Image (tube, rainbow, N blue to C red):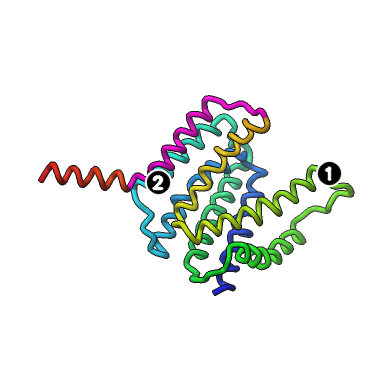
Amino acid sequence: AAHKAYLAAATALFGGMLPVYWGAQYISSGLISVIFGFSPIVTGYFAWRFIHENGFSAMKVMGALSGVAGLLVIFSQDMSLEGDYFYGMLSVLSAVIIHALSAVWVKSVKTDIPALALVAGGLLYSMPMFIAVYLLFAPELPDMIPQKALWSILYLGVVGSVLGFVCYYYLLKRLATSSVALITLITPVLALIIGYAFNNEDISKSLLAGTSFVLLGLALHQWGDTLSNKICRKRKHYSG
C-alpha cells in the first residue's frame, strides 16, 4: 500500500508539474491559473467515478465554473494567445487531468502514511524521471548561476514542493477530494492580494470583481447543496 501511495504521489509531482513548467513558455501565468480553475470539476468527476465520493453535484459544478469565471475576469487583460499557445494550453490541461487522477489515486489507497512521508516517497519515486528528462532535454548549465535563480530554485524545492505538498496531502486525508481541489481557485487570488500587501502592487477593479466570483463559487461549492435541499423541502412542504 505504501509503494502504491508513493507512486500515486509521484504521478502528481512529475506528471502534474512538468507539463505546467513546459507550457509556461507558451502561455501566460494568468491563463495557466484559469485552466487549473477547472481542476475541481475534473477532480470531482474522477472522485465520483472511481472512488464514489458524493461530491459531484450540479451546485458544486456551478461553484467551480463561477470560480473559473472569476479567474477569467482577473486575468483577461494579461492573457496572451499568440504563437504556440495551443500546445501550452494542451500541456497545462494534461497536467490538470494527471493531477486530478493522482489525487483520486492517493485517496483510494487505504494507508495511514503521514503526509511528510508520503511527499518524501513521492519525491524519491519521481526523482529518476526528473533526472532522465534533464539528461535528455536540458541545455548546458551556465558558468555562473545568478543568485536570484538559486534562491528561486531553493524556494521551489522547499516551499513549492515539500511544504506545499505536505499541506496538500494532509488535507487530502481529511477532506473530500473535490474540496481540496478548490486550492486552484484560491491560490491566484491570494497571490495577488499578497502582492498588494507586501509588494505595493495595485488592486484593480477586475481583481475585486473576479474575487467576488471566486468567493461566490466557493460558497456555492461549500453550502450550495444544503441551500438547494432546503429550498426543495420548503417547496414540497408548501405544495403538500
The picture quadrant where one finds residue 234 is: top left
Q: Which mark is residue 146?
A: 1
What's the residue type where badge 1 is placed? Answer: Pro
- Residue depicted at x 15% and y 45%: 237
The picture quadrant where one finds residue 83 is: top right
- Residue depicted at x 86% and y 49%: 142
Q: Which mark is residue 194?
A: none
Q: Nearer the viewer, residue 57 or 28?
A: 57
x and y, in percent, of residue 62 in the image? 38, 43
The picture quadrant where one finds residue 66 is: top left
Q: Please state, as top left, top right, bottom left or bottom right, where the N terminus lies in the image.
A: bottom right
- Determine the residue located farthest toward the left in the rendered image: 240
Residue named by callout 2: 221
What's the residue type where badge 2 is placed? Answer: His
Q: Give the crowd class for mark 1: few <14, some 14-19, many >=20 residues within 10 Å.
A: few
Using the numbered discs, state the Cα–Cα distance from disc 2 to disc 1 in whole angstroms.
44 Å
Q: Look at the image and give the residue range highlighted in magenta.
A: 200-225
Indicate the secondary structure of the residue bearing disc 2: helix
Q: Nearer the viewer, residue 32 or 59?
A: 59
Residue 122 among magenta residues: no
Q: Give the crowd class for mark 2: few <14, some 14-19, many >=20 residues within 10 Å.
A: many
